[in-house]
Amino acid sequence: VQLQASGGGLVQSGGSLRLSCAASRNEYNILGGGWYRQAPGKQRELVAAVTSDGSPNYADSVKGRFIISKDANGKKLELQMNSLKVEDTAVYYCNADLKRVRNSMTRNHWGQGTEVTVSS
């Protein structure tokens, strides 16, 4: 099973993008997870996370602008990014605990990165 991320792209400053992440196989559910980003020359940092019960947590730099959500079926982990700034430019990665429905085995997974570029 893999985590598949989508939704990156090029947007002007002040614009919005929505990132989405899902398991590649339907027999897995997302328990909780987060979105990380890595800008050129910088370390990967946590942007937002959501627990299995839906409680969100945000980095100070994105509070009030980004919203993380997990759908009720546990199939998607999304990040709505509003009022984007040039400094939000980075490769964004999703990370999630995937639970296999059949045997309840849980494992942490990383998705492939999706690039977000915000132009001035």
Image: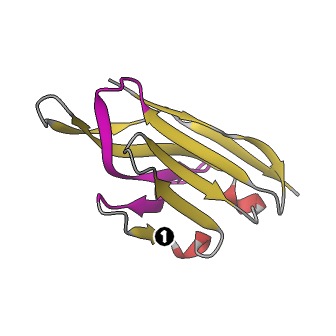
**Could you tell whether 19 is left or right of 47 in the image?**
right
Query: 43 or 9: nearer the eye?
Result: 9
Q: Is residue 44 visible?
A: no
* Magenta stretch bounds: 23-52
Image height check: is 1 above or below 108?
Answer: above
Residue sitting at x 62%, y 56%? 80
Residue sitting at x 61%, y 50%? 39
Magenta span has 12?
Answer: no
Residue sitting at x 71%, y 62%? 82
Instruction: Give the class, few, some or many, for how many residues have Cα within 10 Å of label 1's Cα (few <14, many ≥20).
Output: some
Query: 27 or 2: nearer the eye?
Result: 27
The location of residue 25, given as percent across then percent down, is 36, 23
Query: 97 or 45: nearer the eye?
Result: 97
The location of residue 102, given as percent across then percent down, is 15, 28
Image height check: is 104 above or below 56?
Answer: above
The location of residue 52, given as percent across then percent down, is 29, 58
Residue type at mark 1: give it. Answer: Tyr
Residue sitting at x 58%, y 74%? 63
Image height check: is 44 above or below 57?
Answer: above
User: In this figure, which residue is indicated by the disc labeled 1?
Assistant: 58
Q: Quadrant of residue 108?
A: top left
